[in-house]
Image (cartoon, helix red, strand yellow):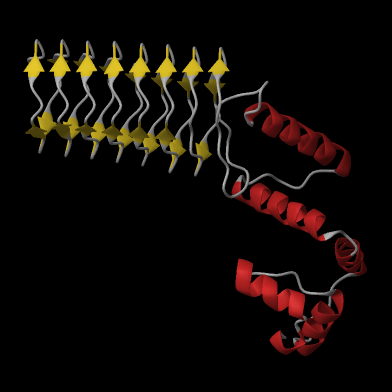
Amino acid sequence: MEKSFESAQKRELDEEGWTFIRRAQFDQLCRDQYAEFPDKVKAKMAEFDGLHKSQREEAVWKRIERIARDIPEVNSKLKGKMDKRRREKIVRLHFSAKNRRRMKRQQPNGEISGLSVLKPVVLEPYMFTPIYGLSVLGPLILSPNIFSPVILAPSVLSPWVLSPAAPVPYILSPYVFGPFIFSPMAMAPFILTPYVLSPNVLNPFALSPLILSPTVSNDNFLSPQILGGGILSPTVGSPAVLTESALMASVFSPSVLSKK
């Protein structure tokens, strides 16, 4: 099969790790493997082969998404409506001057930036999505996420509620009035990220140290921590209530009015 690849296919294999085979190559592969398909399948393959490369790629990603989400096959009319809603959802979630700060990643190298005001994110899991930009009154609710670092993303009145995350480093992203509630986090270091009046409520942390991140009036209610602590991170008025911690470090991190 590889001997029949054209130069463009070889280049795609080298650069992207995969390529589309031509119809003649597919037919030859079927003959070599003594495979035979119904006429309906052959018609679909002929239709697919006639698409532009970008259209074929979009079709492949849609199929992968349907498999990943366990979406059953539907009739073409309903399928069209689903795809239309999907496109509208992407536009709504993808940040521009008029849209949101966060989006659910639909393809590689997605990033979100800018200013977001009164834009809550509800029931929108996402992954591999760097987040940056100011958020005001933009709570994250029932939206678990993975591998989505928060970079240069100040937040005001934007709580995390029922949105577990890992790993999710916070870098230069101060929080004000942004409590973490029922949102367990792992591998979530706060680096140069002060946060104020943002209590943790029933919010366990693991491997989530504070580094150069002072905290003020951030009570911890039933929010156990392990393998964390503070490094050059003073704490003021942040008592731990019914909160146990283990294997915590404190390096040049004074604590004032923050007793357990």
Q: Nearer the viewer, residue 210 or 39?
A: 210
Which quadrant is the C terminus positioned in? top left
State which quadrant residue 199 falls in. Answer: top left
Quick one: quadrant of the N terminus? bottom right
Identify which residue, 185 or 16, lies in the foreground: 16
Q: Quadrant of residue 172?
A: top left
Question: 222 or 225, which lies in front?
Answer: 225
Which x, y percent locates residue 145? 45, 36
Q: Is residue 59 visible?
A: yes
Residue 103 coordinates in the image, percent (x, y): 58, 33
How many dots with numbers? 0
**Image-based side of 94 in relation to 36, left or right:** left
- Residue at position x 55%, y 39% from top? 111
Pick the residue in front: 253 or 125.
253
Judge left or right: residue 6 versus residue 230. right
Height in image: 52 above or below 193?
below
* Residue 17 in sight here: no
Residue 37 image point, x, y percent: 84, 73
Asked if 80 appears above or below 139 in the picture, the reply is below
Tell me the quarter of the picture where residue 251 sits: top left
- Residue located at (66% from left, 53% from top): 64
Q: Position of residue 233 (x, y in %)?
A: 17, 26
Residue in the picture at 75% in, 69% down: 20
